[in-house]
Amino acid sequence: MYGWIWRHLPGNAWVRALISIVLVLAVVYALFQYVFPWAEPLLPFNDVTVDGQ
Amino acid sequence: MGGVRLVVRTFSELCLTVGTLIVLFVVYVLYWTGVQAESASAGQIDTLQREWAAAPVAPPPPRPSSGPPASSPAPKAPAYTPGKGIAVMYVPRLGKDWKWPVLEGTGPGVLKKGLGHYAATARLGATGNFSVAGHRRTYGDPFKDFPRLRAGDAVVLTDGTTWFTYRIDRGPYRTVPTDVGVVAPVPKKSGFDGPGRYLTLTTCEPEWGSSHRLIVWAHLDGTQPVTDGRPQALDS
């Protein structure tokens, strides 16, 4: 999987490494910005009220 | 042979990926939500203090000591705006620097920024039960030390014109999430036997779960205008 991505990145090893780092950062950003805020309310830590549900 | 290698390698990479995802998610829940809540709650307190500084004239503070408490549900008091800050809470037992904004409503979005006031309950300082929910864990852990609360502890709130000092009447009471009677105007099982100016705090129990709730009840012990300075309870 990662080998496939590596082989399909352009440029020499240094350019590929740089692109890889940017890709990783982009994925982490997307996770923290969109995916985790969506997933976190599914955990029980938000249930702090009495509401009869 | 090559096919097996590919399968094993891909499977290993997937496991590594899932592991990394879990670690990142734990970092998000334990650390990042706290960072966000810290800046959000500080922003809410800033907004409140700016509004209070800009307010023209302070209305006269309510006097719970004069007259029977049952006679004063002020009908013209405007409803709180959902999602907006209404007060700042201080609980010396939870820390000398412990202060959190109280916002109107108890939705998940509100509780990310501070404590939430049950919209159906009384206004701050009014007759009835001013009820507030807060996270025990994540989003800054405001009620992490909730079980340490004891009878006699002060819960101090200010709405910009008045300091309200509530006193807790008994240690945390454990109940189930459906027990809405705990935020009733005269909460059942609280020991209060008539209408009064009460406060209820709720959070989750156990610390990392949601099967139960922890409750403390308090009564209004005294008020003073902010112009008279901070109440003594904050410095004791």
Image: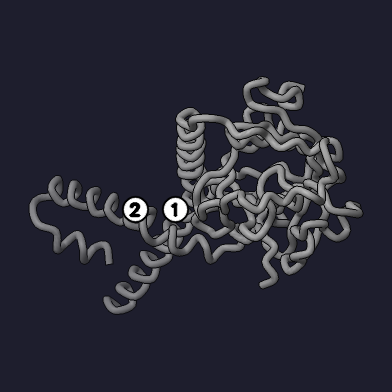
Give the camera-side residue of A17 and A42. Answer: A42
Residue indicated by mark 2: A28
Whole-angstrom CA distance, mark 1 to mark 2, is 8 Å
Return the residue nearer the eye: B220 or B114. B220
Q: Which is nearer the eye, B146 or B19?
A: B146
Residue at image point 71% right, 53% down: B202
Residue that appears at 75% across and 36% down: B63
Circle 1 residue: B24
Q: SS of the residue at dot 1?
A: helix
Give the left or right position of residue B185, taking residue A36 as reference.
right
Which of the chains bears the disc numbered 1? B
| Residue at 82% over, 57% down | B186
Q: Amino acid at mark 1?
A: Leu
The three-letter code of the residue at mark 2 reads: Val
Q: Residue at x 34, y 68 (%)?
A: B9
Q: Position of residue B40 (x, y in %)?
A: 46, 42
**Relative to residue B221, is residue B12 depicted above or below?**
below
Residue B127 in the image: state x and y as whole percent: 76, 49
Mark 1 and mark 2 residues within 8 Å of each other at the beta carbon:
yes
Image position, residue B204 (x, y; %):
69, 56
Is residue B212 shown to the viewer in this render? yes
Q: Is residue B38 left or right of residue B141?
A: left
